[in-house]
Structure formats: C-alpha cells, structure tokens
Image (spheres, rainbow, N blue to C red):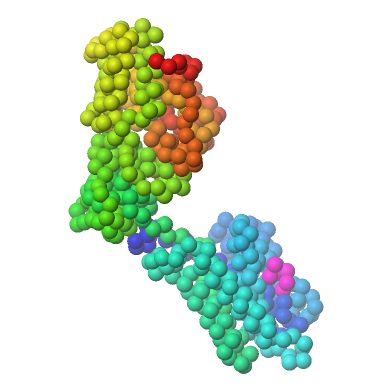
C-alpha cells in the first residue's frame, strides 16, 4: 500500500527492501571486519557465525524477494559463511574478509557515479574496520596502531557524511520536512559524534565500543538513503508546480495567488477531487484537453492542498509568493498554458510562467496562417469560414486570415461547400470540430496541433514548420508523456521545451494532414505497443506539401 509523506507528495519507501538492505550491508560489514582483522583481533567464534549466518540468509532472501543480481547474492552468501568456517586459519580468513569487503563496496556502489562510489567506499571501509575492532580484542604487541586507525576512520566517516549532506542539495526546510532529510541529518550527526568521541576519549577500547554505536547509526542511515524517495524541489512562486499525490502526478498552474488550475492525467481516472482553502473542487474534463482539471483558490505565500483520489489521498505544498495573478492561465485557454509550462518543466527549466500562448499571435504563427490562406487559394477553394474566440491571439489570427483571403479574392462566409479555418483556442476548436462538415475540409491554426483537438474531427490540415514524426518532436512527446502520466504533446509545450534546451523552430512552413486511422504505424512512431508520445494518438500525420512560398 502506498502512503504519502506530508507536504512532499513523495511515495513512502519499500519497507521490505529497506530492511533487507540495512540488514545485509551492516551484517556484511561486521563479518568482513571479523575476517579482515582476524590476524590481530580475537573475536568469539559464535559471533562470527551469527554475523555470517545473518548475512548469508539475508543475501539469499534478497535474491528471491528483490530484483538483485543472483551472482552477487550467491557470492555474498558463500563468502559470508566461509569467514566463520575458516576463522582458525588467520591468513586465509583475512583474504576472505578482504574479498567480502570488496563485494560489499561493489554492491553498495553499483550503478553510482564516481563521486557517489567514492563515498560508498568510505562508508563501507570504515564500517568494516570499525566493527572488526569493536567486537574483538587486539593484542598490544600486534604491531597495529588502533589509535591512528580510529582517527583516520573517524575523519573519513565525517568527511563522507558532510560531503553527502552538501551534495544532497537539501540545505533548506526539507531537512526537517521529509524522511530523506531527517535520515541525512542523522547520518551527519552520527558521523561527527564519532569524530568528537575519537578526539576526546583516550581509552581506545571505549572509543571503539561506544564509537561503534555512532558508526552503526551512520551506516544504517547510509544504507537506507537510496531506498527513501528524495523530496520534490521546493515550490517557486510563479513556476508551475509538478508534484505527486494520491498516486498520481499533479500540475499546478500558474502557481500564483488566486485562481489556479490543478491538472491530473487521464491515468488518474475521474474520481479525483482537490481540497484547498477549505473548499472542495472536483477535477473534471475540459474540451480540447486531456485528463481532468480542478479550479482552486490559493492564498499568497506558502500553503498546501489535499488531493483525494478514490480511497487515496496526499498533500501538495505550494508557494505562490506575492506575485500578481495571471488570468489567462485559468480561463478557457488555461489548459494550453499549463501544457506550455509542462513542456518547460520536463526539460528541466525553472522559469516563471509570465504569459500564456493565447495572449498574442506570434510572428511564426502569423506567417504560417498567411501561407495556409495562400495554399487554400491556390487549391481553388471557393470560400472559407473563419472560427475564432475572444482571446487576443484568436482575434489577431482571424484578422490575418480574413485580410489574406480578401487580398486573394477568397470569399469569407459560412458555407458547407467551402473550407473551415479554425484559429480559436483548444476548447472552442474541440466544440466546433465535433460537428464540422465542409466540402473542402477543416484547416487548423498551428497551436491546435494537440491530440484531443485534432482527434475531434476525422481529418484536418495544419501549417507547421516542423515534422511531428522526426526524432526531436518524438523525444519531446515521450518526455512529456513519461513526465506526466501519458500527457499528449502540444505546440505550446514543444516551443517551451525547445527554449529550455536553447533551441527553436526554424523550418519552413509546410501543410500537414492528420487523420484518425490506425493502419499507417511506422517504427519511428511507435514506442512499444502504445501511442504514448505520438502527436496524434490513434491516428497519423504526414506532410502533403513541400515548403510553402511567402504569401
């Protein structure tokens, strides 16, 4: 069962995996230390058998219960049991302990970067040596100097702990607001406590005995951290918030004081509600967009709201600051604005959302619409009907289309024997297209390239300056789909995704035709057996002209 950490929206840990990891690495460190230091430290045989037996049993259990390398598990169990078996042969068991220590380091650092692997090596080595000295008694005439060993190990442990703390990036309230942060703090405190104890206490046997507690706490925290989900980045006012709650992704846009949209993917289902500022808003579908949307009122500054999805619930923390409202992000064109924001988020951008696509007609879209009208005129279309809405972009687009039509002698009237040109936003377009029937077809503005809009009609044409089937377009589609539960791509999101990567759309405008067919699947359209990431799910889109000349 999945639980949620308060104020983070982070799923709880896999408790079984966490317990097995802690038991495996701590017991292995102990038995490796017993073997490695056998030549100079005397350890009770029963303790070696207990440590080796636990390590071997947990290793075998992990092979069945978790997805781990079976070869590692077998080698681990064999070496762990070999140490107590060969305990009386000091030279041989030393090599076994060394081999087990190397295996411990390899298992702990598997798949980690070079810096993380170095930190793992330090924790594993310190645990092996410290536990080896702590559970046994060493001979004063052995030639080994336990004092410098303790100080070196304590310094290495403290350095690794502080390094992990600084590299975590959690130098903020998440240290006390999240399980991950609290465990990290425990690791650092335990590491520093061992160093202080080593520097202050003169009796080395007491240093090792009592210090073993601090080393154990640090090692447990170190082994537990990879199994604990990291908390989300802190919310930034004006930057749309992507989080997780009640087992589903959540997008909050524009993340400013006042009215906000809370978006859920289609995979979240229809039984979703949001409680914010004491009011409950159900998430409902919106025409021309995917998933569901709830409209909520957020106060200025830090707060949170609760997401309820069936029997599950979780909270999402927000920080709207003192920014002015952004009405265009919440009205009829709000879903497109949120899609634009999502494109930037999945590209790693932390830029504020300060305007929405529907607030102005871009130079690129102006050019595309002019060339669309030229294409229609050259195709001898008798008339066009232009459908827009009240947004600044739609009004400007309608003026461009009508002006170009008049210049080319193309009649503008509502005639089923002509063509339909839609320059509205997503919502109005989806409503119009559901019942559209024109002899010369349906033609859409570039920003209407969005699956739920395009699939509202059997076929349509769109002027684009990029190929939705090329690698870059599909990479964006897959990024937004994987980042938000299968969310379909959009031109607004694509542009913001490209901007975050310091790229843009520079191609020439061509006319693309889309159709709701499921027979023209190509390898580069497919990702497994689903249409996730494709621009036109359950359909196809192909270029039907070459680059168009200026109108």
Q: Who's the residue at 22% across and 30% down the image?
A: 390
Q: Who's the residue at 34% across and 61% down the image?
A: 7
Magenta highlight range = 97-102
- Answer above or below: position of 277 versus 374: below
Count of picture labels: 0
Give the camera-side residue of 58 and 550.
550
Q: Position of residue 202 (x, y in %)?
A: 61, 92
Q: Position of residue 517 (x, y in %)?
A: 43, 22
Question: Magenta stretch mostly in which secondary structure?
Answer: helix
Whether the magenta-drawn stretch holds residue 178 is answered as no
For the C terminus, the quadrant is top left
Q: Position of residue 145 (x, y in %)?
A: 72, 86
Give the camera-side residue of 51 and 107.
107
- Answer above or below: position of 127 versus 115: below
Q: Is residue 47 left or right of residue 234?
A: right
Q: Who's the residue at 54% across and 77% down the image?
A: 191
Q: Who's the residue at 23% across and 28% down the image?
A: 389
């Amino acid at each position: 069962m999945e639980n949620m950490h308060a104020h983070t929206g982070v799923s709880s840990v896999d408790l079984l995996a966490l317990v097995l990891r802690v038991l495996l690495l701590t017991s292995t460190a102990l038995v490796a230390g017993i073997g490695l230091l056998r030549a100079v430290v005397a350890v009770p045989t029963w303790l070696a058998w207990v440590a080796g037996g636990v390590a071997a049993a947990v290793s075998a259990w992990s092979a069945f219960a978790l997805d781990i390398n079976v070869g590692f598990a077998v080698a681990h169990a064999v070496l762990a049991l070999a140490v107590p078996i060969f305990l009386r042969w000091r030279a041989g068991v030393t090599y076994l302990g060394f081999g087990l220590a190397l295996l411990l380091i390899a298992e702990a650092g598997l798949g980690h970067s070079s810096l993380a692997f170095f930190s793992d090596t330090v924790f594993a080595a310190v645990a092996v040596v410290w536990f080896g000295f702590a559970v046994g008694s060493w001979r004063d005439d052995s030639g080994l100097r336990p004092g410098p060993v303790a100080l070196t190990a304590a310094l290495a442990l403290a350095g690794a702990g502080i390094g992990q703390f600084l590299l975590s990036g959690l130098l903020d309230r998440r240290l006390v607001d999240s399980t991950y942060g609290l465990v990290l703090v425990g690791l650092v405190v335990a590491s520093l406590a061992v160093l202080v104890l080593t520097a202050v206490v003169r009796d080395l046997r007491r240093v090792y005995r009592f210090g073993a507690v601090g080393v154990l706490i640090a090692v447990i925290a170190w082994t537990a951290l990879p199994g604990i989900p990291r908390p989300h980045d802190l919310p930034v006012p004006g930057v749309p918030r992507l989080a997780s709650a009640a087992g589903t992704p959540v997008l909050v846009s524009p993340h400013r004081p006042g009215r906000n949209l809370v978006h859920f993917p289609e995979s979240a289902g229809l039984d979703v509600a949001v409680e914010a500022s004491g009011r409950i808003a159900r998430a409902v579908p919106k025409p021309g967009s995917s998933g569901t949307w709830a409209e909520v009122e957020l106060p200025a500054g830090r707060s949170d709201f609760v997401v309820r999805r069936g029997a599950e619930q979780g909270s999402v923390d927000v920080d709207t600051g003192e920014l002015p409202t952004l009405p265009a992000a919440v009205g009829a064109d709000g879903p497109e604005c949120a899609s634009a924001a999502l494109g930037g988020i999945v590209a790693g951008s932390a830029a504020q959302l300060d305007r929405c696509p529907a607030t102005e007609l871009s130079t690129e879209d102006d050019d595309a619409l002019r060339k669309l009208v030229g294409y229609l005129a050259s195709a001898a279309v008798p008339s066009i009907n232009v459908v827009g809405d009240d947004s600044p972009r739609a009004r400007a687009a309608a003026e461009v289309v009508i002006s170009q039509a008049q210049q080319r002698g193309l009649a503008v009237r509502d005639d089923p024997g002509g063509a339909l040109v839609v320059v509205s936003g997503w919502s109005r377009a989806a409503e119009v297209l559901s019942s559209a029937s024109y002899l010369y077809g349906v033609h859409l503005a570039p920003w209407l390239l969005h699956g739920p809009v395009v699939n509202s009609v059997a076929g349509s044409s769109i002027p684009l300056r990029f190929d939705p089937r090329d690698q870059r377009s599909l990479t964006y589609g897959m990024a937004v789909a994987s980042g938000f539960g299968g969310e379909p791509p959009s031109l607004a999101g694509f542009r913001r995704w490209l901007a975050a990567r310091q790229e843009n759309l520079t191609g020439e405008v061509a006319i693309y035709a889309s159709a709701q067919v499921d027979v023209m699947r190509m390898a580069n359209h497919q990702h497994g057996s689903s249409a996730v990431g494709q621009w036109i799910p359950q359909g196809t889109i192909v270029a039907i002209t070459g680059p168009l000349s200026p109108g």
